Each structure stands twice: as structure tokens, then as C-alpha cells.
Amino acid sequence: MIGSNYTLQPLDVIQVTVFKEPDLEQQVRVSQDGSINLPLIGKVHVAGMTVNDANVLITDLYNRDYLVNPQISMILISYTESRAYVHGQVNRPGPVIIPPEETMTLSQVISAAGSTTRLASDRIQLTRTDKNGKKTVMYFDFSDIMEDPEANDIIVRDGDTIFIDERII
């Protein structure tokens, strides 16, 4: 179950209920710019906030000018799935869903893609695109990650692309 510490992001759907004010009840999708539009208070930026923090903000906004001691509840109806994409020498190439409120490492994502094939190289290429569209390419040695407890098993982010090349025989 996704809790109140889930961080809202664009395309999430939330239900906002105001106790004893059925006209203010709304089911809204967080827009691409990170905002929602609610009756009376209008546009509110909630992306990047936890469900609990957004609930406190909306309660405060209604309390300022419109309602006396409003009782607001906010429930996450559906969340935007985070995905990493795995290509190359894995048994199940394609998208791997990263569960909400969890992190996955490079080795965990490769495992979720069915692990590497017998033809896989130990070299892993991870391509990450930042919010400004700038791509960063990083390389890792899979055998180091699996065998060395001190090796850097990087946290995979939404939209990362992982490529495992075929080993040269």
C-alpha cells in the first residue's frame, strides 16, 4: 500500500475530500507542470511533495479564506509507474517497473530482467537523461558489482536505460 510519504509526481491521480463539503470533493490528475486545480483555491503545485505535505498545504489554503477548520483527506488513487529499460544480453529485455517508495539497484534491475544470458559481457552501460535533456553515460563492471561488497551498485532512476553487450569470444 502506498502511504502518505509517497512523493507526488506528474500524472498521479489523487482524491481530495473535504469533510461535510461534497461540492469540493475532487478526483484530480497531477498535471505535467506538477499542479492540480481545486475548487475555490485554484491551481496548487504539489509535485515533489509527499501526500501528507500536500494535504497540509491544501488544508492551509482552504483554511485561509474559505473554510473554518477544514478537515481534508487526500488519497492517492493511482501513481505514475517508474521504469528502467534493459536491453542487450538479458533473458527478458524491456521495461522493468520500479515499485513506488522503493529503490532498485543496477543488479536488482538486471535480475528483474531475468538476469544476463550466457553470452553477456560483464560491461554494463547505463544512460541517464536529466531534467534538462542532458544524457550521461556511465559504465560498470557487473562481475565487480556481484563479487565485491565495496563495489558501487548504483541506484537506478526512472527512465534509465541499461545495455549489456555481448561478450567477445
Image: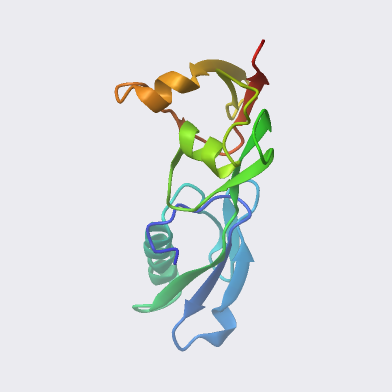
- In the rendered image, residue 167, in percent from the top left (x then y), is placed at 64, 15
Instruction: Tell me the residue at 40%/60% (across/down).
Output: 57
Which is nearer the eye, 83 or 15? 83
Quadrant in the picture for residue 149: top left
Instruction: Tell me the residue at 61%/28% (across/down).
Output: 162
Q: How is the image coloured?
A: rainbow
Instruction: Tell me the residue at 58%/18% (across/down).
Output: 136
Which is nearer the eye, 34 or 40? 34
Farthest bottom residue in view: 20
| The C terminus sits in image quarter | top right
- In the rendered image, residue 115, in percent from the top left (x then y), is placed at 57, 37
Relative to 50, say whether 111 is above or below: above
| The N terminus sits in image quarter | bottom left
Quadrant in the picture for residue 114: top right
Report whether 9 appears left or right of 74: right
Q: Give the total number of marks visible in the rendering.
A: 0
- In the rendered image, residue 152, in percent from the top left (x then y), is placed at 38, 23
Which is nearer the eye, 34 or 155? 155
Report whether 78 appears left or right of 88: left
Quadrant in the picture for residue 112: top right
Instruction: Tell me the residue at 43%/28% (across/down).
Output: 154
- In the rendered image, residue 88, in percent from the top left (x then y), is placed at 69, 27
Report whether 31 appears left or right of 55: right
Farthest top residue in view: 169
